[in-house]
Amino acid sequence: MIHCCITKALIGADAPFELSVDISMQHETLNTIYGKSGSGKTTILRILAGLEKPDKGFIEINGQVWFDSSTGVNLSPQKRKVGLVFQDYALFTTMTVMENLKFAQGKKNEKKINDLLELTGITSLQDRYPTMLSGGQQQRVAFARAILREPDILLLDEPLSALDQHTRYQLQDEILKYHKSFGLTTILVSHDKQEVFKLSDAVMVIDRGKIIRSGTPLEVFFEKITSHKFSFASTILSIRKVDCIYLAVIGAGNELVEVVLSEQDIKTLKEGDEVLVASKAFNPIVMKL
């Protein structure tokens, strides 16, 4: 169980504001903090990692107090079991992939490193330097390094934002694989609705330092349903049955659309299919590409 109740004065682009959040997260869940740039998302991760100090409050992780302003407890970053993955990877450019991973490991365990190399598909890259790798390959190394710390929390600060769409989709699947394989408690910062919907167990929407909405991705993003005329190609993110109908959630740029599927559609469509969504007499139809 994670409980983070903190406040911190921040300077925004327009005016100063106060970051004030009270967050609880269950063990082995993937939670996303969603919001505009400058709303305090990254600051929350930095505070959890011990890289910034809140003005007041407390942080308790799995029964251990990491920070408590009332008693003066403030564990150093080295004493917090945190895996942190940035969008800029932050790999040591003078070290090979293998050396980067060995450096991250407290208690040396080469078998675990080799297992992670295989799981992340970078075994053949272990003797290369970061500058010789693609963005996706570097990000896989960054994930492997973070997991090797055996973290109580894995913190992901928009880790896929610098990658092309195809690589992002691949790594989204891999994030879920790592999260489930290692039983991680993961906190993701993202401003991409499709990514948030695909990955998250729970979502917190933050605006100028305050959590303004929280819940499952369905609860958060489909609080208000509107109807639009449209035609676009995208991917089916999920299909679920509600009473006697089927509902598909489909990405539309940085938005999400929920469409009713027929019994015939269900026979040919599944999650992950690329589809064309179009309006016909104001009723949406979904056709597999």
Image (tube, helix red, strand yellow):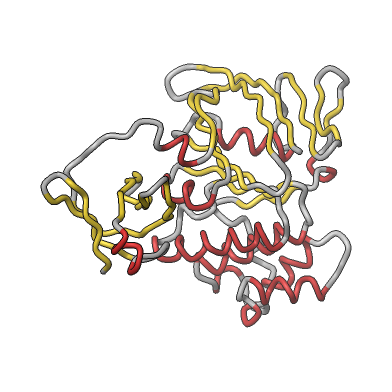
The furthest residue to the bottom: 124
Left or right, 69 with respect to 247, comes to right
Tell me the quarter of the image containing the C terminus.
bottom left
Residue 44: give x, y in percent of width and height.
63, 33
Quadrant assignment, res 18 = top right
| Observer-nearest of 230 and 74 | 230
Residue occupying image coordinates x 72% and y 59%: 147
Percent position of residue 269, x then y: 35, 65
What is the number of callouts on the image? Answer: 0
Question: Looking at the picture, does residue 103 appear above or below residue 244?
Answer: below
Q: Is residue 248 left or right of residue 72?
A: left
Task: Kindly identify the residue that appears in the image at 34 percent across and 46 percent down.
Answer: 258
Q: Quadrant of residue 96?
A: bottom right
Q: Position of residue 232 (x, y in %)?
A: 22, 55
* Rendered-image quadrant of the N terminus: top right
Residue at left 20%, top 40%? Answer: 228
Q: Position of residue 218 (x, y in %)?
A: 46, 41
Q: Height in image: 233 above or below 113?
A: above
Q: Is residue 187 left or right of residue 103?
A: left
Task: Determine the image quadrant of residue 33.
Answer: top right
Point out the residue furthest to the left here.
Answer: 281
Q: Is residue 95 above or below residue 255?
A: below
Question: What residue is drawn where x is 74% and y is 70%?
Answer: 99
